[in-house]
Amino acid sequence: MALIYKEIFSAIAIAITFIAFIPYILSIHQGKTKPHAFSWIIWASVTFIVFLATLTDKGGAGAWPIGVSGLITLYVAFLAYTKKSDRIISNIDWLFFIVAMTSLPLWYFTSNPLWSVIILTTVDLLGFVPTFRKSYNHPYEEQLTFFNLMASRNLIVIVALENYSLTTLLFPAATAIACILFVLMVIIRRTKIKKA
């Protein structure tokens, strides 16, 4: 019976994933949202690998939304790159991108899924740095609804997990916190710009 509830929460998390991504993707096509390509390439790579690690540690239905998100994130990365959404790539963006991408192979060499998830979660959080930088300077080029929904989705993913361990909990919890912090930073920046 408990498994049915886990699958229901997983289905809700997948639905929220689509609810979050569809308007976000449409906004990219309309030129309103300008995602940072480096962040999305990192997030796509990491999310799909964490999906595999979560499955390995018996995350079950809680892993499914992460896998769906990984595939959609790959498409957003493609859009961000092909549409050249952020034409200003700073040296710090390059630094975090290189560090993140060179860290990805480390997951392969760790035989323990926990170390893989720790490394990949760190890489994923590094992927936020270019988006934080861009959005600090241009706080109206991102959709806060998307990041709010993704924070909520990750909290639901935690409920849907069939096995609770640091391996299965770390990524969705850290990503939810990063989304919340991002939203707060953008709200503060928008408020300051309006006052100016």
Image (spheres, rainbow, N blue to C red):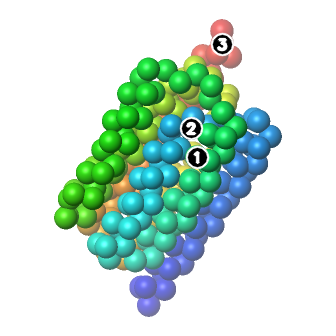
| Residue picked out by circle 3 | 195
Disc nearer the start of the sequence (1/3): 1
* Quadrant showing the N terminus: bottom left
Type of residue at label 3? Answer: Lys
Residue shown at the point (49%, 66%) measured from the top left? 67
Q: Secondary structure at mark 1?
A: helix
Circles 1 and 2, Cβ within 8 Å, touching? The answer is yes
Q: Position of residue 42 (x, y in %)?
A: 45, 45
Give the number of the disc on residue 37.
2
Does the image show residue 159? Answer: no
- Displayed quadrant of residue 116: bottom left
**Front residue of 112 and 87:** 87
The residue positioned 33% from the left and 36% from the top of the image is 99
Q: Are marks 1 and 3 in contact (CB under 8 Å)?
A: no
Residue 61 against residue 194 in the figure, above or below = below
Indicate left or right for 177 with 57 as reference.
right
How far is disc 2 from disc 3 in space, using C-alphas? 30 Å
Q: Is 180 situated left or right of 186 in this image?
A: left
Drawn side of residue 33 relative to residue 121, left or right: right
- Residue ID for mark 1: 77
Residue beneath the point at 49% across and 21% down:
90
Q: For the residue marked with disc 2, what is the amino acid? A: Ala
Residue extending farthest to the left is: 111
Mark 2: few/some/many CA within 10 Å (<14, 14-19, 20+): many
* Mark 3 residue crowding within 10 angstroms, few (<14) / some (14–19) / many (20+): few
